[in-house]
């Protein structure tokens, strides 16, 4: 995606951005960098949306995302505003990456490709040539897809007329769209532990490796080839860095201000927003709000064809999160830890088909105090513990929360040979219902619609509305999808379309 300073040619133009998640912040910054007068409305008292921050009894937690990939996306965003990302966000490359604990007792620590390949040989007895062939395959998919599927609108003719897109379309089958991730991974490796490790990347956009197209196997290269990153002040440091940037370039940020409705005139032309009982005029409105919430609540247009379609598309998975302040340190754990279930296929079938919290869940433990000691009182650790769960369906999650807590504690106590419950000093939790209530994300899905089908990439809402003139969309429920780098890209794509630069 191109970067650089853009001419300030739109000084007369005003734009409203609804929602201060990473997508909304990205769009606000990109538009301000192009000379728009931007007002950003966020209903919560603080910015960040799903990427929030929470402090309980001296333990600080990132409430949602924990691993940053593709930090170059943020570099590009800052460059648009003529600023340097380094001056605002302190990104830390991670090596090693993740400590994996398998149900059969095997342990392996993942790392960048050059360090990881020898470990794979040592632990799983996989010949180096086989691992190399896999990462070559994964990189090839990434090279063929990233600029088209991630950095451009899929709904503009200009995308398809570029030489790059045509070349990629000619090599359509090289992006491995017709097999599932699991099937492709099994064609490379016989060891079920290696397959499980690679299948896990489907969860990076809330999908199942037994349904999602193998094109998503590019994520293995993104993480192991391009690297996983932490942030010095925790992931929330990205939000505060972007907030500072937005203020520096003149974005008017109004937190604690819910937009009640989008205003419109004849011919479904958007004319502004209604916020706190006031009608405010804007010729351009960008929504970082979930697509269905936008149509049903902000536009009163629940019968719009795209709203109807969204109601039929399966949302991505959600999660149960436990925020635990732990009163001691664990040397066996790193910043990122995965405790795999014994039967991965059953786990995904329970989440995506039976819509239940798995009996034997894979447990993810993120500890930012390993990177930023100030995130926990001295000698302690801040554990963010995530179990994948189905989206909210109206149930009362307390039973699932309690039952899963017991199982997670039992599993982690066994693996770490400690009575974990005795060391939980401070505690909080997050359920799919809360995610829906707090961020207006349809059914509390973490990443918009799931990528469980070949067509999902093409079914996401465009970054603009054909039905409502002057309305543009960014965030996890629209193209190119959920996750920090993608929603940030969505804000940039949206601004490019508004400014007529594509
Ligand atoms: C538990 C969890 C774990 C995750 N792990 C990762 C990870 O490791 N890596 C990764 O890349 N991603 C991860 N994600 C996903 C990532 O957090 C999201 O994809 C991304 O932050 C979404 O950004 P967004 O801009 O689309 O929307 P959101 O963050 O949902 O922001 C939307 C904002 O709009 C506001 N809003 C809604 N309605 C209104 C209104 N009417 N008026 C004003 N404001 C309104 C909301 O309050 C909210 O702040 C995770 C998410 C969660 C919840």
Image: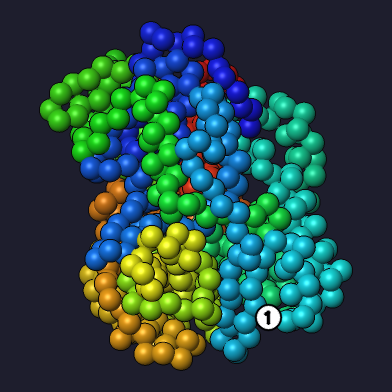
Quarter that holds the C terminus: top right
Q: Is 101 above or below relative to 228? A: below
391 relative to 149 in the view: left or right = left
Percent across and percent down for residue 290 are 36, 43
Of 283 and 100, nearer the camera is 100
474 relative to 453 in the view: left or right = left
Quarter that holds the N terminus: top right
Of 294 and 114, nearer the camera is 114
Q: Residue at x 46, y 91 (%)?
A: 417
Q: Residue at x 33, y 82 (%)?
A: 423
Q: Residue at x 47, y 37 (%)?
A: 88
Of 376 and 170, nearer the camera is 376
Residue 345 appears in the picture as rendered: no
Residue under label 1, please give it.
192
Furthest toward the right, the residue is 129
What coloring was used for the rendering?
rainbow
Residue 288 falls in image quadrant: top left
Percent across and percent down for residue 115 are 74, 66
Residue 123 falls in image quadrant: bottom right
Percent across and percent down for residue 401 are 29, 75
Q: Is 37 above or below relative to 483? A: above
Residue 369 falls in image quadrant: bottom left
Q: Is 12 above or below relative to 48? A: above
Secondary element at tag 1: helix
Q: Is 107 above or below relative to 91? A: below
Q: Residue at x 28, y 37 (%)?
A: 42
Q: How many numbered callouts?
A: 1
């Amino acid at each position: 995606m191109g970067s650089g300073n853009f001419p300030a040619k739109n000084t007369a133009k005003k734009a409203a951005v609804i929602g201060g998640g990473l997508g909304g912040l990205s769009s606000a910054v990109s538009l301000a960098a192009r000379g728009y007068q931007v007002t950003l409305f966020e209903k919560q008292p603080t910015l960040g949306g799903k990427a929030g921050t929470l402090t309980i009894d001296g333990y600080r937690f990132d409430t949602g995302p924990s691993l940053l990939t593709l930090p170059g996306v943020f570099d590009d965003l800052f460059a648009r505003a003529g600023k340097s990302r380094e001056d605002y966000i302190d990104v830390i490359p991670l090596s090693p990456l993740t400590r994996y604990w398998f149900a059969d007792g095997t342990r392996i620590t993942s790392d960048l490709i050059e360090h990881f390949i020898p470990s794979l040989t040592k632990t799983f007895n996989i010949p180096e040539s086989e691992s190399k062939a896999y990462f070559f395959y994964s990189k090839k998919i990434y090279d063929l897809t990233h600029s088209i599927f991630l950095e451009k609108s899929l709904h503009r003719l200009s995308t398809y007329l570029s030489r790059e897109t045509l070349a990629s379309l000619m090599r359509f089958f090289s992006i491995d769209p017709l097999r599932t991730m699991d099937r492709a991974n099994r064609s490379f490796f016989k060891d079920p532990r290696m397959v499980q490790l690679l299948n896990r990347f489907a969860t990076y956009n809330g999908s199942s490796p037994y349904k999602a197209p193998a094109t998503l196997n590019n994520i293995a290269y993104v993480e192991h080839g391009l690297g996983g990153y932490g942030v010095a002040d925790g992931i929330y440091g990205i939000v505060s860095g972007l907030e500072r940037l937005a203020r520096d370039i003149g974005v008017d940020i109004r937190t604690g201000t819910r937009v009640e409705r989008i205003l419109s005139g004849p011919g479904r032309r958007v004319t502004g927003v209604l916020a706190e009982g006031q009608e405010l005029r804007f010729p351009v409105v960008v929504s970082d709000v979930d697509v269905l919430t936008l149509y049903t609540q902000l536009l009163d247009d629940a019968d719009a064809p795209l709203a109807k379609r969204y109601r039929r598309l399966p949302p991505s998975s959600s999660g149960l999160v436990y925020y635990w302040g732990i009163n001691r340190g664990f040397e066996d754990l790193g910043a990122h830890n995965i405790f795999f279930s014994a039967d991965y296929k059953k786990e995904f079938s329970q989440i995506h088909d039976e819509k239940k919290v798995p009996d034997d869940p894979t447990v993810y433990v993120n500890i930012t105090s390993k990177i930023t000691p100030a995130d926990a009182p001295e000698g302690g650790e801040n554990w963010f513990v995530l179990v994948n769960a189905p989206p909210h369906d109206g149930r009362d999650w307390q039973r699932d929360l309690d039952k899963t807590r017991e199982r997670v504690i039992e599993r982690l106590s066994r693996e770490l040979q400690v009575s974990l419950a005795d060391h939980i000093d401070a505690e909080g939790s997050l359920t799919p219902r809360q995610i829906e209530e707090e961020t207006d994300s349809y059914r509390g899905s973490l990443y918009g619609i799931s990528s469980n089908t070949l067509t999902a990439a093409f079914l996401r809402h465009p970054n603009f509305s054909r039905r409502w003139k002057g309305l543009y969309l960014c965030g996890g429920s629209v193209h190119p999808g959920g996750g920090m780098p993608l929603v940030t890209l969505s804000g940039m794509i949206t601004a490019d379309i508004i400014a007529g630069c594509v």
